[in-house]
Image (cartoon, rainbow, N blue to C red):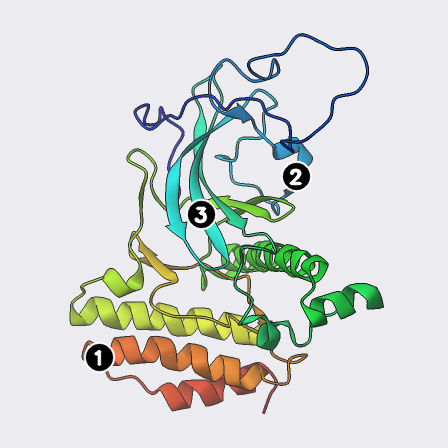
Amino acid sequence: MREHDSDGPATLRRGRRKFDDDESDFLKRGRLEPALKEDPDLPDEGDGWSTWDAAEQGPDPRPDWVRTEHGAVDTELGILKTGKEADVFLVRRYLPSTGAFSMLAAKRYRDGEHRMFHRDAGYLEGRRVRRSREMRAMTNRTSFGKELIAGQWAAAEFGALSRLWQVGQESGLICVPYPVQLIGTEVMLEFVGDWETGEAAPRLAQVRADDDTLADLWRQMTDALSVLARAQVAHGDLSPYNILVHRGRLVLIDLPQIVDVIANPRGGEFIARDVHNVANWFRARGLAVDADGLVERLRYEAGLR
């Protein structure tokens, strides 16, 4: 699911961003300086320097395609997906001195004024923060509380991907994008798709497959669900729309709502919902699947039976 380093597409490159103050009414104090048309620290090409050094970084062993060099630059190539909680952008991280590059999906969670929080309550059961003030703010959905929740979504997804990526490397039974870095409410992930064209891998919902391929995809699905159950977590929002199919492999994405099925009193319900959401898709395409039997097995593997 990874591409080798090579020259990427040049036609998608954006223009350089302009330098502006964070606030339009910001009052400058002290001696006046000549106004600069653009940030003098910007690289000669791309939108800005790589933020790798300032970020929480992904797990080891780190794939060799991850660009960790100080001279790497980032160029935003366009939007991949919009959603109620976050938008996902395609970013090319490029090292001008060698031509090596990687393609990343930058998932940026919306701030407290622009996100939809109607689904938060059930997923956040079982999650706690250390300070009672922060817990109250999250419970009451104040502006401060919403910002904390947004940070929790990003941190939860980064943590879940880090854990599951390592499990996948060891077992080969589950596949997720490599989590490259986390800064605030932005998670940067491995882009799953064609690195030359910037075309993302299709979602499971878009796939047209014969009986043998369907059976193989269902086997992969049950293996991945078993890995989650043994880790005592559920995806929480699994569906054919947040599973990619890349080179014959299922790749699970969108894990900010991952649920601790032991701490969350509705953990068993989340397992069952995940199973039935995907089982219905396979069943509608003619594959006989035993969803109820799988739910019972997963609950046992998770320690709920």
Amino acid type at circle 2 is Ala
SS type, badge 1 = helix
Return the disc, 1 or 2, that comes first in the chain's sequence. Answer: 2
SS type, badge 3 = strand
Q: Are marks 1 and 2 in contact (CB under 8 Å)?
A: no
Residue at 66 percent across and 39 percent down: it is: 55
- Comparing 145 with 75, the one in front is 145
Q: Are marks 2 and 3 in contact (CB under 8 Å)?
A: no
The nearer-to-camera label among 1 and 3 is 3
Amino acid type at circle 3 is Val
Residue at 79 percent across and 11 percent down: it is: 31
Return the disc, 1 or 3, that comes first in the chain's sequence. Answer: 3
Residue 179 % position (x, y): 54, 48
10 Å crowding of disc 1: few (<14), some (14-19), many (20+) = few
Distance between the Cα atoms at labels 1 and 2? Answer: 43 Å
Distance between the Cα atoms at labels 2 and 3? Answer: 18 Å
Q: Is residue 199 left or right of residue 275?
A: left
Residue 30 % position (x, y): 82, 15
Write down the quadrant of residue 8 in the picture. top left
SS type, badge 2 = loop
Q: Is residue 171 left or right of residue 125?
A: left
Q: Is residue 1 visible?
A: no
Amino acid type at circle 1 is Ala
Return the disc, 2 or 3, that comes first in the chain's sequence. Answer: 2
The C terminus, quarter of image:
bottom right
10 Å crowding of disc 3: few (<14), some (14-19), many (20+) = many
The nearer-to-camera label among 2 and 3 is 3
- According to the picture, the residue beneath numbered tag 2 turns out to be 55
- According to the picture, the residue beneath numbered tag 1 turns out to be 284
* Mark carried by residue 88: 3
